[in-house]
Amino acid sequence: MISRIKPHYLYSILVVGILVLTFWITWSVSWQQSLQGLEQANQQYLEQFSGHLDSRLSRFRFLPQLVAKNNLLSELLRTPDRLSNVQAVNRFLKEVNQITGASDTYLMDTTGLTIAASNWREKLTFVGQNFSFRPYFALAMQGRVGHYFALGTTSKERGYYFSYPVRHAAGIVGVLVIKMDMSNIEQYWSNQNTQFMVSDPDGVIFITTTADWLYRSIRPLSQQDMERIRGTLRYGDASVNPLTYQPGGKVSDNSRIVKMGLPGQEVTRYLASLYEMPEAGWSVQVLTPLHELTSGSLVMALTVLLLVISILSISLLVRLRIKRQHERERIRREAQKQLEKMVSERTQDLENEILLHKKTEKTLRATQDELIQAAKLALVGEMSTSISHELNNPLAAIRSYADNARQFLAKNKGQKVDENLGRIAGLTERMAKISNQLKFFSRKSSGQLEPTNLNPVIQTAIEIAGPQYQKKHIQINKQGVESAIYADVDIIQLEQVLINLISNAVHAIGDENEGEIGISTEQVEGSIFIHVDDSGPGIDEEDLCRIFEPFFTTRDAGLGLGLSISSRIITSMNGKLSARNLSGAGARFTISLPGYTQSNDSS
C-alpha cells in the first residue's frame, strides 16, 4: 500500500513544483519585458518633454542680444530724464513683447533700477523696481549672457529670465531682460499618465505635474544653500522642504527605480528617467508609477499558471477527445460524400439549365433576325406600288421605243434606230438599278459592328426609299449630313432603320401637301446623332411615350413593329432611338450612337 502511495505523492509534488516554477519564471520575464517597454516609453516622453522645454528656451535665447543693440535703449540709459525717450522705449519693449510672445521685457540701469518696461501701464509694473540682487543682472553687468529661473517678486509667476548688457562706446550702460512665462507648462503635459518634474542645480523642483512636489527638493539642502536661495528670492517666500526620494536599482544608463513621496506619507515606486539640460542647469525627470507594472506582471503570471493548469487538465481528456474526434471525422466524411453528391447533381442540373438558356437565346436571336427580315420585306411590299410605278413607266417607254425602232429599221433610218436602242439601254439600266437596290435591301445582316462612314449609308437608304417619296413629290434635304462622320454600326441594319424612318416620314406628310424630309448629322462630345425630320403634323403628346412599343401604331394598315424593331436594332449597336415634336411643325427622330475616330482605328 505504501509503495503505491509514494509515486502519487511524488507526482503531486512534481506538479506543484512545476506550477511554482512556471509562476516565478513568468512573473520575472513579464516584469523585465514590461519594465523595458516602460523604460522605452519613458525615454520617448523624456525626449518630447525636454524637446518642448528646449524649443521654448530657444525662442528667446538670442532675442536679448538683438534687442539690446537698439539705439533707443542706449540713448535712454545715457539720458534717463528725457520723458520722450522713456515713452519711446516703453512702447518699443511692449511691441517686442507682442511680437515674440514674451511675458515681460524691461531695461535696468547699472544699479539694477528698472527705468523702462513693457508693462509700464500696468498696476504691478516693473518700472522703479530694483533687481540687482538677481544673478542674471550680475552676469550681464560682467558682459555675459544671463540665464536664470526664478519666481517673479512682483508678478509671483514662474519665469525664465534672459539678460544681456546694453553697451555704448565699449562700455556697459545697462541691462536688458526678457522674461519667458513658464507657469503653464504643467497644463500642457498634465493629461499624461506619467509624472514630469524639472529641478535646478540645488535639486529644487520648480516645474512638475504633481502640485504637492512644487518648490520641494529631492535631496536635503544645507543651511548655507537655503540662505543663498532665500537671498536671491528665487522662489519667493516658499519654504523649500525636502521630499522622500530614495534611489533604487538601475535599469539603464539614465533610468532607475526610485521611491518618492511626501514626508510622513507612503512612498510610491517609480521608474525614473533622467535628462540633463546643462545650458539651463536643469535636470528633467519622467516618473511612471510601477504599481500597474506589478499588477500586470502578476496577472500575466496567474494567467500562464491557469493556462498550464488547463493544459494539464486537458491532457487527462485527450483519449476521450481523440475518440470523439475520430467519430466526428467519420460522420463528417459521410456528410461530405452526401454533400458532394448533391453538389454534383445540382451542378448537372445547372449545366442543363445553362444549355437550355443558350438554346432559347439562340432561338430568340434567330426569331428576332427573321422578324427583322420580315419587317424589311413588309416594307418592300409597302413600297411595291411605288416600285411598280417606277418599273411600269420604263417598260412602257421600252415598248414604244422598240416599235419605233422597227419602223425606222424598215425605212433604213439607222441613226434613229440607234438612238431608240440607246434609250432602251438607259431604261433597262434604270430598272436594273431599282432591282439591285431591292435585292441589296432584302439581304440579311452579318450582325457585326464595324467602323463606318455614315454618309454613304444615309445615301443608300435615300436611294432605296426613292420611289416611295418621289411618287408623292416629297423633297429630301440632306445638306446637314457631314461628308465624313464615323461610328461603329451594322451597315445593313442601320440602312433598314433609316429607310423605315424615311418611310414613316412619308406617311406622316401624307398625300395632300408636298412636304420635305430633312436628314442631318451631328457630333457632340464623342456621340454621333442622325436626325430625320419631317414636315408633317407631328406626334400626339400622349403617343410619344408609346410609339416604340410593339404593335402600337397610329396608321390603319400598320403593324406597329417598325419603330419597335428599329429601336431594338439601335440598342444592339449601343445606341438609342428617340422622338420629339419640332417647335414649328413636324417631328424629329434621332439616332444616337457612340462616336468613332479613325486615329483610334489606325493605332
Image: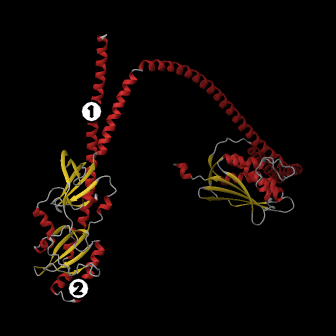
Which residue corresponds to the image point at 25% horizontal and 79% vertical from the top-left? 125
Q: Quadrant of residue 291?
A: top left
Is 546 on the left-hand or right-hand side of 23? right
Earlier along the polypeptide chain: callout 2 or callout 1? 1
- Camera-side residue of 391 and 90: 90
Q: Which residue is the extreme one toward the front?
A: 264
Secondary structure found at label 2: helix
Position in image of residue 508 (x %, y %): 81, 57
Which residue corresponds to the image point at 31% horizontal and 38% vertical from the top-left? 298
For marks 2 and 1, give the one nearer the viewer: 1
Position in image of residue 3 (x %, y %): 29, 11
The residue pinned by badge 1 equals 24
Position in image of residue 50 (x %, y %): 24, 58
- Camera-side residue of 222 and 545: 222
What's the amino acid at mark 1? Trp
Position in image of residue 579 (x %, y %): 73, 56
What's the amino acid at mark 2? Val
The residue pinned by badge 2 equals 86
Image color mode = secondary structure
Residue 490 visible to the viewer = no
Q: How many marks?
A: 2
- Compute the Cα span from label 2 to label 1: 75 Å
The relative height of residue 187 versus residue 301 in the rendered view (above or below) is below
Disc number for residue 208: none
The quadrant in which the N terminus is found is top left
The relative height of residue 95 versus residue 234 in the rendered view (above or below) is below
Residue 430 visible to the viewer = yes
The relative height of residue 526 versus residue 56 in the rendered view (above or below) is above
